[in-house]
Amino acid sequence: MKIFYIKTTETCNLNCSHCFTSGINGRKIYFDPVATASFVNNFADEQIHIDYHGGEPFLAPLEDMRTFYKLVSEKNKKASFGATTNLTHKLTPEKLSFIQNELSSRIATSWDEGIRWANVRQYDLWKHNVRLLVALGVDIKLFVSMNTQLIKRSPTGVLALFKELGLREVAFERLTHDGSAERNPHIFPTNRQIDDWIWEMHQVNDRGYFNNVLLESIYAKFEGGGNRNSTFCRGCEKIMFTINADGTIAGCPNSAPTSHYAHIGDDIDSILNHEKRGCMIATEALIDPRCIPCEVFGQCGGDCYKLDWDTQCPAPKRLMYGLNNKTDRAVQLQVHLL
């Protein structure tokens, strides 16, 4: 399957400290639905997933989003559609209809401790919208950035909040040094702090209730023989296209504003075989040599190339060691590889 992130705009109504599109400072432009659909329809015979993205995608005219949906879905009956929205805006009847029909009642949103909402009113609006969509049967995937404010909280309390809101799918993500995050180094925990927090979350995770995407991706590496199942972000650049609102094309959405390599108006063969795209794929495939001696390298396979090492690698090694040895031996192990 190929994945297309369609950025309907570069700007947002929020100004999150970690935003890779620079929040309210992002360019106030909108995508061309016809030209963007024409590019995506080069893959009309393939299984594809399309995610409206941004900035805040619902700042763009809803009719443009509908036009894009119509042009693509008519050509590709295998296409699925979703949206990643901050849900900090009024859900009009038109938006609700679009979510329930064109998006098949599936969206993603984010909850980020201490770095997302400017005031309580914004946060209350988000919670109201989440509860409304859950009541309407909309399937919501929640993304949570693992920042310094989050890891000060107990995972028990965090998961309890999500359960109270009716959310069942949660994806915890590590921060990358893109966009606004470059100007806010204080929001980055150390790899060791994240490692310990993930281990603590593993101890209290309600696997029967939550689809905890991060933990499940780790468990999958050790269940059924392992063999690097769900290895973090390896191969993303081969299957992922981010279309910026100005029509430029990139791979990973986190670095799309600065690492684009082509334009939707270019010849499709030149896009797919572009030298910069090839370099991005090759860079992602490289394994840090410090990974090789690690006892769980066979399952881990190396972490995302966008994540930095500090005194240790960015992978959740404490949990991996524990799963590998089926004991809490991870507590006694030195996790600093070098």
Image (cartoon, helix red, strand yellow):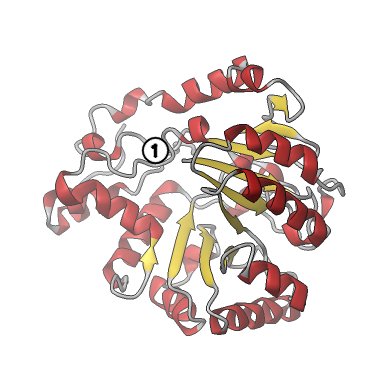
Image quarter where the C terminus lies is top left
- Farthest residue in the right direction? 28
Along the line of sight, which residue is nearer the eye, 229 or 189?
Answer: 229
For the point 47% across and 28% down, which residue is it?
284
For the point 64% across and 39% down, which residue is it?
242
Residue 234 seen in the current view = yes
For residue 181, side relative to residue 136 (left or right) = right
Q: Position of residue 13 (x, y in %)?
A: 80, 62
Q: Which residue is mark 1?
A: 303
Callout 1 secondary element: loop
Q: Position of residue 117 (x, y in %)?
A: 70, 69
- Farthest residue in the left direction? 326
User: Quarter-wise, where is residue 310 in the image?
Assistant: top left
For the point 31% across and 40% down, which residue is it?
336
Q: Is residue 334 above or below residue 109?
A: above
Along the line of sight, which residue is nearer the eye, 257 or 95?
Answer: 95
Mark 1 is surrounded, within 10 Å at the Cα level, by few (under 14), some (14 to 19) or many (20 or more) other residues, namely: many
Along the line of sight, which residue is nearer the eye, 230 or 258?
Answer: 230
Q: Position of residue 267 (x, y in %)?
A: 70, 20
Residue type (three-letter) at the residue carrying disc 1: Asp
Along the line of sight, which residue is nearer the eye, 167 or 173?
Answer: 167
For residue 77, side relative to residue 224 (left or right) = right
Q: Is residue 282 above or below residue 65?
A: above
Q: Position of residue 298 (x, y in %)?
A: 22, 35
For residue 6, side relative to residue 105 (left or right) = right
Q: Is residue 185 above or below residue 83?
A: above
